[in-house]
Image (cartoon, rainbow, N blue to C red):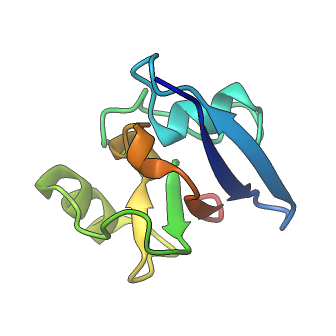
Amino acid sequence: MADVNIKITDRNGVLHEVQAPTDMNMNIMELIRAYELAEEGTIGVCGGMAMCASCQCYVLNDVISLERNPDEEAMLWEAYHVKENSRLGCQIPITEALEGLEIEIAPEQ
């Protein structure tokens, strides 16, 4: 398996082009933490259990579906700054299908 290229705009509006490993069972939230693209303690507060919305991000292209699982939908129902293209980063596993994904990290809750 190969790494995939993902573009992530941080909360300060800075675009980062990162490589994400597809062989480590990671998700987008963990990728953002690994590259330190959000202040420590402000993303993945619940550890990736879809119990907070600290890893909310906006999907900017059509690489992945905007369909949410029930836990993700419930959490985003209670969150702030939610848009039609909102997803929880912890619910997006890194696979080869994410090649070219573009996301923006939502403002802090």
Whole-percent x, y for residue 46 in the image: 42, 32
Q: Image point 52% across, 74% down: which residue?
A: 61
In this picture, residue 58 sits left or right of residue 72 = right
For this view, does 18 lie left or right of residue 56? right
- Rendered residue at 31%/33% (across/down): 49
Vertical placement of residue 25 versus 100, above or below: above
* Residue 54 picture location, percent across and down: 52, 49
- The total of numbered circles placed on residues is 0
At x 44% / y 37%, what residue is drawn? 94
Quarter holding the C terminus? bottom right
Q: Is residue 81 above or below residue 54?
A: below
Residue 43 lies, in percent from the top left, at 59, 40
Single out the residue that lies furthest toward the top: 24
Comparing 34 with 100, the one in front is 100
In the image, farthest residue toward the front: 1
Left or right: residue 49 compared with residue 83: left
Residue 32 left/right relative to 76: right
Percent position of residue 100, x then y: 58, 58
Q: Is residue 19 visible?
A: yes
**12 or 18: which is nearer to us?**
18
> Which quadrant of the structure image shows residue 72?
bottom left
In front of the other: 79 or 84: 84
Looking at this rendering, what residue extends furthest in the left direction?
A: 70
The answer to which quarter of the image holds residue 33 is: top right
Name of the residue lying farthest toward the bottom: 84
